[in-house]
Image (cartoon, rainbow, N blue to C red):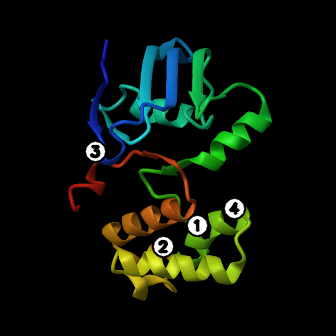
Amino acid sequence: MVKTSVARKKNKKNSSDETIVVSMEHVNKWFGQFHVLRDINLRVVKGERIVICGPSGSGKSTLIRCLNRLEKHQDGDINVHGIELNNDVKNIDEIRREVGMVFQHFNLFPHLSILENCMLAPIWVRKTPRAEAEEIAMHFLTRVKIPEQALKYPGQLSGGAAAACGNCARTLHAATIDAVRRANLCSGS
């Protein structure tokens, strides 16, 4: 059986707050006969940062995708900010407003500019006015030192610039939980 490990780091600013923001209890997920997630138990408290690591095929991406119902788990309980992740569409929508994802391939829309990609979530999910969304997007693109990339398209960017743009898009979603599945975001690659 292949195992996936979780490394934890407590944010010193929030060290006294023990509010549970993610809870997984006895979560199981199968793909046909393959039991990819086996009796997963996980609690993440506010301010805590975790890293999920393991070899290819050990269930890291599947676990993260289950946190906002991109994959449906077959058994167990998942709660995000006290909202149970079940078949209730309202619960799924509520959780998706709070869970930001950066995918391994960044999932930027190729037909939209970087600026337009960064503005999507604020406009469609948070109902932010277009001018305000653009101003905020440019602020974050400037913060990661790539404002000159704003009018380019994803296919015109290097891998590092695409990663930075994916992070800007996630940040602009104004999520309170970040599920990031890209090991080299912190390594400078």
| Side (left or right) of 185 relative to 129 | left
Residue 12: image quadrant is top left
Mark 3 / mark 1, whichever is N-terminal:
3
- Vertically, is 50 above or below 155? above
Which element type, helix, strand or loop, lies under badge 2?
A: helix
The residue identified by callout 2 is 154
Where residue 120 is drawn, which disc sits there? none
In the rendered structure, which disc, 3 or 4, sits on the residue that comes first in sequence? 3
Residue shown at 59% from the left, 18% from the top: 77
> Label 4, label 2: how many angstroms apart (C-alpha)?
23 Å
**Rounded to the nearest whole Å, what is the CA distance between mark 1 and mark 2?**
7 Å
Q: Position of residue 14 (x, y in %)?
A: 36, 43
Please say if 175 is above or below 83.
below
Q: Is residue 156 visible?
A: no
Mark 3 touches mark 4? (CB < 8 Å): no
Which amino acid type is marked by label 4?
Arg
State the separation of the CA atoms marked 3 and 1.
36 Å
Name the foreground residue: 127 vs 113. Answer: 127
Q: Is residue 136 visible?
A: yes
Disc 3 marks a residue whose amino acid type is Lys
Residue 189 image position (x, y, % from top left)? 23, 61
* Disc number placed over residue 126 in the picture, else none: 4
Residue beneath label 3, please?
Answer: 12
Quadrant into which the N terminus falls: top left
Mark before the other along the chain sequence, 2 or 3: 3
The residue indicated by pointer 1 is: 109
Residue type at the position of mark 2: Pro
